[in-house]
Amino acid sequence: MKAVTILGSTGSIGVSTLDVLSRHRDKFSVYALTANGSVEAMLAQCLEHQPQVAVMLDAQAADTLSQRLRENNCLTQVLAGESALEEVAGSDQTDYVVAAIVGAAGLLPTLAAARAGKRILLANKEALVMSGALFMHEVQQNKATLLPVDSEHNAIWQCMPLGSEHQYDFSDKGVRRIILTASGGPFRDADLASLDEVTPEQAVAHPNWSMGQKISVDSATMMNKGLEVIEAHWLFGLPSDKIEVILHRQSIIHSMVDYDDGSVLAQMGNPDMRTPIANTLAWPQRIDSGVAPLDLVAAGRLDFATADFTRFPCLRLAYQALEAGGTSTAILNAANEVAVAAFLQRQIRFTDIARLIEQVLQTLPAKPADSLEQILADDAAARHLARELVC
């Protein structure tokens, strides 16, 4: 029986993880669930899954949850704050940590899990985007097991040659390139001139996947794919010129690996995050995820197209930040988080997201990303500048 902690249990990845876990109660138990301030959602999860600990980032939400749990005779202990997130992520009582907190807020607890040598099911891109070298050093130094949950990286990982449990460098394994597939989001066929008038409601209406608001906007701008390029660089030890992005509107092929001998291996499946979640929970075995079998005849066809930097300037900015190195990727991520939040609040236009990010990158000089303090300092500086530009 493996004990699981879910960082970000009320989000889409967290909910999907709990669905998979509920199908295999003989194999997994829930040690801790965490959320920001969603009391009702966390209450329901605690009553159903009976975790030992629930963590709310917001202290008032934690007090409310504690009272509601007592009223329902639930013995789950409630903790509050960022330090509590790190505490449960590194606890001796948990085996697996699902890192599903969206954004930079997930960095420190995911680092705590790495330092404690846990099996980390990584759905938080920002841990690698912000601090790739530091994070991978902690993983390898502490013999943590890092398994990617993002559907694209999970697909690549499944198609990579088998190596050590702690092997994250495939540069000498005959890999010619990684091919990340992208649906293209809701505006892949839209007239470019119409993008200035895109509303938040249109941007979050993803054609293939059910996701939270922030990641849905990132998918619409293709910044999500840009962050995945950066993540793939750190996960698989390949330079940016060996990581290619192509559009694949059906989201059936989740990504591919092209080998020197001409072989191209692809991982396929219905677009449902429970597949990579089940894969990383059970690895090296396979378990039922609840996902319907893929019907290729019903799918009918698979289409591919070039990812155009003119239509998707955020993808270009991500490649540029990766190539620049240092804290450039942390600055990129911070500016993007502020820009997306401003767009969702109707403070800027959809097309202003990329413009704002580029202005922040051009204004702030990148520093060597050799300490967590420097990374967090540049993250804060980028957020401050981005907010000033919004105003």
Image: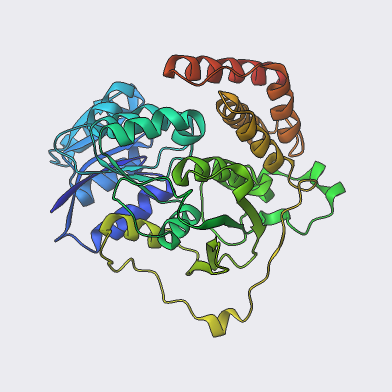
- Identify the residue at the far bottom of this view: 297
Whether residue 204 is visible to the viewer of this picture, yes or no, is no
Residue 377 image point, x, y percent: 51, 14
* Residue 85 placement, left or right of 220: left
Query: Can you give x and y, in whole percent of width and height, for residue 303 in the image?
Result: 67, 70
Residue shown at the point (34%, 60%) measured from the top left: 279
Q: Quadrant of the N terminus?
A: bottom left
Above or below, comparing residue 31 to residue 269 in the picture: above
Can residue 387 be seen in this snapshot? yes
Q: Residue at x 39, y 69 (%)?
A: 291
Whether residue 239 sits left or right of residue 370 in the image: it is right
Count of labels in the image: 0
Most extreme residue toward the right is 193
- Which of the 4 image quarters holds residue 68? top left
From this view, report whether residue 184 is shown above or below residue 8.
Answer: below
Q: Which of 219/56 is in front?
A: 219
Residue 3, given in percent of the width and then of the height, sits at 17, 47
Q: Position of residue 342 (x, y in %)?
A: 65, 30
Which quadrant of the structure image shows residue 144?
A: top left
Residue in the foreground of this view, choosing between 219 and 207: 219
Of residue 191 and residue 70, the one placed in the foreground of this image is 191
Q: Is residue 23 left or right of residue 233?
A: left
| Quarter of the view holding residue 352 | top right
Q: Which quadrant holds the C terminus?
A: top right
